[in-house]
Every structure is written in C-alpha cells, then in structure tokens.
Amino acid sequence: MGVTIGIRREDKNEWERRVPLVPTDLKELSKDPNLVFTIQPSEIRVFTDDEYRQAGITVDENLDDADIVVAVKEIPIDVLQEKKVYFFFSHTIKGQPYNMPLLQHLLDSKSTLIDYERIADEQNRRLIFFSVHAGYAGMIESLVCLARRMEYNGVKTPLLELKHAYEYGSLIEAKNHLLQIGNRIQAEGMGEHEDPIIIGLAGYGNVSRGCQEILDCLPVKEIAVSDLEETAGMTAAQAGPLVKVVFKEQDMVEPKSNDAQFVLQDYYQRPENYRGIFENYLPHMDLLMNTIYWEDRYPRLVTKKWAKGQYGPDKRPRLQVIGDISCDIEGSIELTLKAPMPDQPCFVFDPQTGKIHDGIEGDGPVIMAVDNLPCELPRESSEYFSEVLRDMMTALGQTDFQSDFEGLHLPSHLKKAVITHRGELTPSYKYLQEALDKARG
C-alpha cells in the first residue's frame, strides 16, 4: 500500500520560507511506488505550490492520512495528532523549557519524534544541518552591523555597500557583491579606517566554515591566535585591511590546575576543571563571531561582568559587534538577551543598565543574534538540506513504527535521533524527564 509522507508548511514566522524537501528531490523519490508525498500549500515558501504540482506532488491542506509528517521547525502543539511519526528540529535536547510542553504532548499522544539535530555518524558528527548557511547569512549580517556601527562612530568604509542577506536574490549574488566590495577594498583600502578590522571566529565547525567562506570573498588575511595582540597594534598598511583569527577550545579555556595540560576530550567530559580565558582576547578584536555549541556547564565567552568593566560613556573598546550565530539566550554570550528578526537583526546591550535597545546606537556592544539565519537564504539552504534528507526517506518508509523501540529497523544514524516513541522517551533521552518534571512544576 505504501507510506504517505506529509510535508507541513512552515509558519513559525513570516521569515520561515524553507522546506525540508524540494520539488526536484520529491519528483525523484516519487518513482518509488511505496512512497507517496503530500505537501501543504504555502504563500511564503520559497518553492511555490505550482513547482510541487509540476513535479507531480499533491498539494493539499489535509495531512490527516500521512503516516510520517516532515517539517523544518517545531510543529504547533494544537496540530499534532496521535500515534504519528514526526521529523523536525524540536529544540528539546537541552531540555529547553519553552519546548517542554511540545515534548510532553508528543509523549502523551504516543507519537514518534525524530530530530534532525541528533542524526549523526559513528563519530557523532552531524549528518544533516543548516549550519553552513547560518554561517553565510550570519557573517553577512554581522558585517552589515559592523559597517553601520562604524559609521555611527564617524568612520565610513566600503562595507557600507553590503545589504542584508535576505535582500540578495541568491547566495551567488551575495558573494559576487562581496567580491566587488573586496576588489574596491584591495584597490582603495578601508576608506577612513586606518587600522585593520580584526574578526575573531570562536569555533571551527560548519557554522564557522560558512562564515569564513563569506569572509574569503574579501581581502582577508588569517593570523594565528598567538599573533593577535601584536597584529592589533599594527596599521592596516602593515597587517592588511581585514584580518581573521580562528579560536579552538584550547584558546578559550585553560586547566584550573597549574599542573594540568589541556586535553580536548577531558574538557568535554569534565569542563568544571577548566576556566575561561577568552575574554583576554576580546580587547583586540573589532568583530567577534560566535559559532560554538554551548551548554551551561562550559565557561562563557563573554560575560556581563566583563562588559560592564569595558563599556561606558567614556569608554570605547575596540570590540564593536558580536555576531552570536549560536544564539543561546544568556548563554556563551551572556549579553544575548533576545533573538531579533532579520529586518532588525541587532541590538545594543548597555552593560551599565543591563538593558537592550534595537539598532546600533548607544554605549555597549552591538549584538547580532538572529536565530533563524538560514531563512535569509531559503532556496540554497533548502536545496542543501533536501539533498541529504532525500537519501533518508526510503529507510523511513520501510520502517514499521508500530514495533517497540528495540524493534525499529532504522539505520543507526536515524535510530539515534529518535527521541520519543510510543509514549516514552527512548533510552538515550531519559535525561529529559528531569526537564519535563521541572516544566510541570
């Protein structure tokens, strides 16, 4: 009879135009007679309803008959049905309080939840993600914020020509514009700015890779962390107009014991034995990009206490903008108090009052913390995601989800991403019960 897979439209906000499976991939998957696809209509999705119809896919509001429902972001609780299989980013694996009601409802309805974030290989490397595209858009937005902040401080640079990521018709268009700006910088310099613009990247994973791919469209020079302080004292003529420096874990923390050495796996397993040292580097950067995965057991990169000692009416430290792509509220960047939308991507944190206001004006660092950055490049990010997801759909369609968890014959990378099944947390996610209990009060 086959398996019906429903694709839910995204409606978390007006910016969410992505889709998990694009028309060309669904057309190819539909050649399997055991897979039947239905997609809900959408007025804002980057791929139109007609593009899906032309690919032979049914467009229908009703997904009641779907055995598996696929989406990108969280599905509203009021549309979840009993005993279905759901496949989306649930944002529950850290026990996030705001999504514990969603997780509890999935348990109560005896549904199966598969979370993209936990699909990983044997080395626990994630296999499907929007991370690179978050890096692309986040880097563009942070450069836009930096250019405008510098203008507010009386310095105009060629970076002012940059547009918001969502204002470009495509990633290629954005990169071509960056290359044009880069050529101008190469020929004319940074205009009124005489010092190198130093950009620090905390992290070296997929998000950082996306950031660096954007930066590399400009005449940027990479330096070692050990050379940062010396480079910060140079002129642009000496160091170059743009400088990037990439920080790894050993640059961000050190063992608390003088007798100990940094060991990466030991840090992951026992972070309480390490203290943060990242704030030592902050005075030497103009722009910090935060791309790391963070939990509250790890030291922060930027604290409110540090910021309060650095910024004020008579204090103008070098660090002007923090691009917090990770966007953990009061997390590794403790100054991140909210996640703004792409049309107003940044706010200023006033360390003396602890308050924030939208825009780039005022005393304190500018924070760019849009949490759905891939939405700004919806076509490319959807195509990238779909190319990986399509290869998982056949395995999903062949799985009998009526069996108990032990009997689910899923490939290992998918099975480890099953968070709930038939009313229970699966073995690897029993730890979430504490967060669920806390949410219930």
Image (cartoon, rainbow, N blue to C red):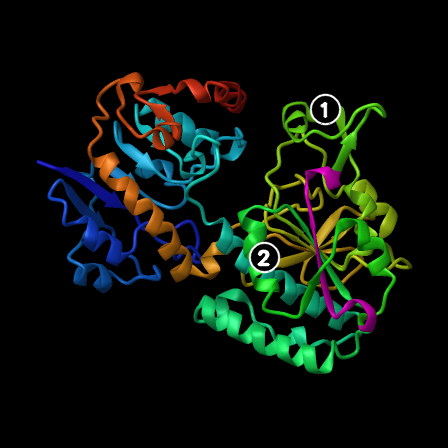
Q: Determine whether the residue tagged by mark 2 lies in a helix, strand or loop.
A: helix
- Residue sitting at x 37%, y 25%: 420
Q: Quadrant of residue 409?
A: top left
Q: Residue at x 31, y 28 (%)?
A: 112
**Residue 350 seen in render:** yes
Q: Which residue is the extreme one toward the right?
A: 314
Residue 144, how many percent across, how many down?
63, 67
Circle 1: residue type = Glu
In the image, residue 119 above or below residue 438 = below
User: Is 154 displayed left or right of 163 in the figure?
Assistant: right
Disc 1: which residue: 272
Q: Tell me, for residue 307, which label it has, or none.
A: none
Q: Position of residue 44 (x, y in %)?
A: 35, 61
Q: Is residue 21 left or right of residue 32?
A: right
Residue 251 within the magenta-colored segment of the rendering: yes
Residue 211 got which mark? 2
Q: Quadrant of the C terminus?
A: top right
Type of the residue with mark 2? Cys
Q: Are marks 1 and 2 in contact (CB under 8 Å)?
A: no
- Point out residue 186 in the picture as x, y percentages from the top left corner: 68, 78
Q: CA distance from mark 1 to mark 2?
A: 30 Å
Q: Which residues are magenta?
A: 237-252
Q: Residues within 10 Å of mark 1 (few under 14, many from 20)?
A: few
Residue 298 position by quadrant: top right
Q: Residue at x 44, y 30 (%)?
A: 122
Q: Is residue 375 above or below residue 437?
A: below
Residue 231 image point, x, y percent: 82, 60
| Quadrant position of residue 142 | bottom right
Tell me the SS state at disc 1. helix
